[in-house]
Amino acid sequence: MLLRLLNRLGILVASLVVSSVVVFAFMAVLPGDPARVALGVNASDAAVAQLRTDFGLDRPLPVQYVSWVTGLVTFDPGTSYVSGIAIAPQLVDRLQVTLILVGVAMLLALVVAVPMGTVMAVRHRKLSGLALSAVAQLGVAVPGFLAGILLITVFAVTLGWLPANGWTPPAQDPVMFVKQLILPVLSLGLVQAAVLTRYVRSAVLDVLREDYLRTARSKGLTPGRALVRHGLRNAAVPVVTVLGLQLATLLIGAVVVERVFVIPGLGSLLLDSVSQRDLIVVQDVVMLLVVAVLVVNFVVDLLYLVIDPRLRAGAR
């Protein structure tokens, strides 16, 4: 068990190192001079050279890489090339917003997908199961940004029930915070719920065909009790895999949804920094997203050990 944990931890660290090299190399080969962009086309060569020295852009690339990684590890990722403001406080503020958005959206997806997928599996040959499958298929076909535009059109523009965009911190106005959160969460969560529902249905269908479930029913358990007591735990293993992948998808999807709903999260910061060619901020945000995805995958691996006793037995 401990060996397996250390093995996965080693893979996580190696993945982080490789990812940091790739992200840094990709930003380094992009054409253009960040110092020239920051000062404008009319800046003198001397001013540009001085700014390159101030930002450390005149140093060899390996030195820049080590300096950047050291800054990330020590929570000091540098200052913006454009605004000159420290990046760390911006990342913390924006990350809080994105985590709230993604966390609530994932919770919504689970609340919808688990019971809906289970019902679809149990009633897969009946009209109700087929109808739910059709609804899930429709949800899979709708991209998150399109769902957001449709929700804005219906609930904000036509009905006027909810604000179309904006973000109010919960400590400032809890009611407005909830109102502004509803539409972006629905845009992200319902689309993910549609995808997850299909995996839950498939996993539960596989469990329903297992011999141990027939044995449980032959001992007098109702189909529902047999499924809850013996089936759902086994069905959770493949669903957890998909859940980890979907969380990564949600982080990427939040970039677009934040732009649609004018939410000041990591996605908005990333897109604003790209448009301003503020490469150090882009580099830091991309690396932060990569770290989030890799850590989620690491946690999913740990959940396998918790859910599936066969893996724990094999790890001993």
Image (tube, rainbow, N blue to C red):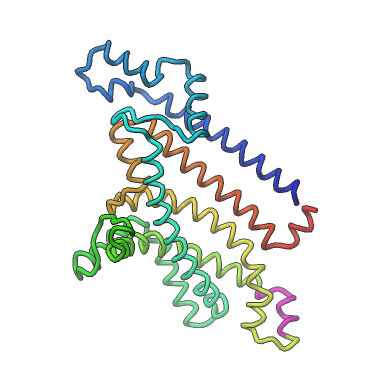
Q: Viewer-proximal residue, 302 or 32?
A: 302
Looking at the image, which residue sits at the far bottom?
A: 220
Please state if 311 lies on the left or on the right of 242 as rendered.
right
Please state if 63 lies on the left or on the right of 175 as rendered.
right
Looking at the image, which residue sits at the far front?
A: 171
At x 51%, y 33%, the residue is 74
The answer to whether residue 194 of the structure is visible from this angle is no
User: Which contiguous range is marked in magenta?
Assistant: 208-217
Question: Residue 1, position in %: x, y?
Answer: 75, 52
Question: Residue 130, position in %: x, y?
Answer: 48, 77
Please state if 309 lies on the left or on the right of 185 as rendered.
right
At x 67%, y 63%, the residue is 307
Disc count in the image? 0
Q: Is residue 102 located in the magenta-colored stretch of the structure?
A: no
Q: Viewer-proximal residue, 124 or 251?
A: 251
At x 75%, y 61%, the residue is 310
The rendered magenta stretch, by its main secondary structure, is classed as helix
Residue 66 drawn above or below residue 154:
above
Residue 145 drawn above or below residue 41:
below
At x 69%, y 75%, the residue is 230
Residue 167 drawn above or below residue 128:
above
Question: Residue 24, position in %: x, y?
Answer: 47, 29
The answer to whether residue 143 of the structure is visible from this angle is yes
Image quadrant where residue 42 sits = top left
Question: Residue 155, position in %: x, y?
Answer: 25, 68
Q: Is residue 213 located in the magenta-colored stretch of the structure?
A: yes
